[in-house]
Image: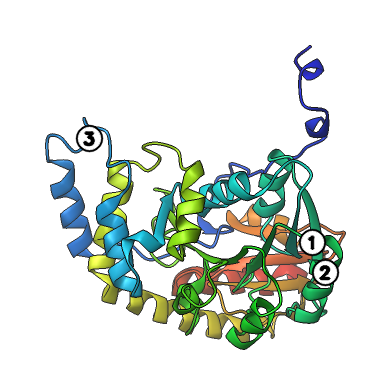
Amino acid sequence: MINNYLRKDLLDFKNYHVPTLDYKIKLDANENPFFHSENVMAKAIEWLQEKDNLTRYPDNNQNSLREKIGTTFGVTKDNVICGVGSDQIIEYILKVFIDPGDTILVPSPSFSMYQLSNTLNHGKTVEYELEDDFSYNIEKIIDLYQIHNPKVIFICSPNNPTGTIISKAKLKQLLEVVKCPVVIDEAYGEFIDDGMISEINYHKQIVILKTFSKAFGLAGLRVGYGIGSTSMIDAISIAKAPYNLSSFSAAMAEMVLTDIEYYKENIKLIKENRDYLFENLKKVPVIDEVYPSEGNFILIKVKDTGVANHLQHFRILVRGYGNSGRLANCIRLTIGNKEENEMLLKRLNEFYKLF
């Protein structure tokens, strides 16, 4: 009955699915394995005890948080828009730039929300395939741009789930040619040395997507933001929902940035753990290939499709990609703490002994 009224293009639509599974070690969502600083937690408790903080509506424009983000990254608050995760910023971008039937370009394989959100917004999606080593081919993007005349181009760097990046030089090369908005998803940007924020006033068609969910450990509060020229942020803000970010989420994000040196040390440790895990994964018999990564995760290709289920049996959650398509037999592993990484290696190494 209800399907008779559903949009015809959504009858077979598959939304983003996240299974709810019991776990001992969670390595499936690229979260931060380390807890917050004592300083941040003390401020959080103090904030919760203020009588008006939870009973009043939040600041509709997140002025204090945007000011802090601006100070942290060397821009103004007018260069910043905040949302419920960077997913909401993606939705805003598509709402303001995409008319029904308009085309966007997205990398493949990459983060699926670009295409899912575009479909819900009545847009068309054209994928540009990454190279065999999952690197970006600028010429390929330019060719598709000239053929399809997209309204928006998405780039993810470091790319999820491959961990590959696109250099600043190549991005500048692309921006010399394309005129449409270019969304550069830097959700994992804290794990690389140089992003594109410094270019927002030289290339006014770009917007940088960022999040507090990965390096800053606030995945449970869902705080994302976009940084761009004032003209770009003004345009995206047309679609902004009122009171979209809770007071506590905004306050916690600001607290994290006041103690940023603590999180920089965590990031350094995650990168060290990643390098250690990378070298040791290459020694595991059931693994065919370990792909270099610039994120807080590593993509591997395994020889047996039962590996993910084997890990789940021991309550270790990982992100598997099935046995077909470009990522056939691939598994994405979040970088955990030392103990989690050692247990992961142990269970992977014993796979052939048990089966």
Q: Secondary structure at mark 3?
A: loop
Identify the residue shown where x is 66% and y is 59%.
Answer: 111
Identify the residue shown where x is 78% and y is 59%.
Answer: 306
> Foreground residue, 279 or 271?
271
Q: Which residue is denoted by mark 1 in the rendering?
A: 149
Q: Secondary structure at mark 1?
A: loop
Where does residue 260 sit, x and y in percent of width and height?
Answer: 28, 72
Amino acid type, residue under disc 1 in the picture: Asn
Q: Secondary structure at mark 2?
A: helix
Q: Are marks 1 and 2 in contact (CB under 8 Å)?
A: yes
**Nearer the observer, disc 2 or disc 3?**
2
Does 219 sit left or right of 347 as displayed?
A: left
Identify the residue shown where x is 13% and y is 49%.
Answer: 46
Q: Which residue is denoted by mark 3 in the rendering?
A: 54
- Residue 166 numbered tag: none
**Image quadrant containing the C terminus:** bottom right
Number of residues whose C-alpha sits closer than 10 Å to that of mark 2, classed few (under 14), some (14–19) or many (20 or more): few
Amino acid type, residue under disc 2 in the picture: Gln
> Foreground residue, 211 or 346?
211
Vertical placement of residue 101 versus 106, above or below: above
On the question of residue 223 being in view, the answer is no
Q: Which residue is denoted by mark 2 in the rendering?
A: 146
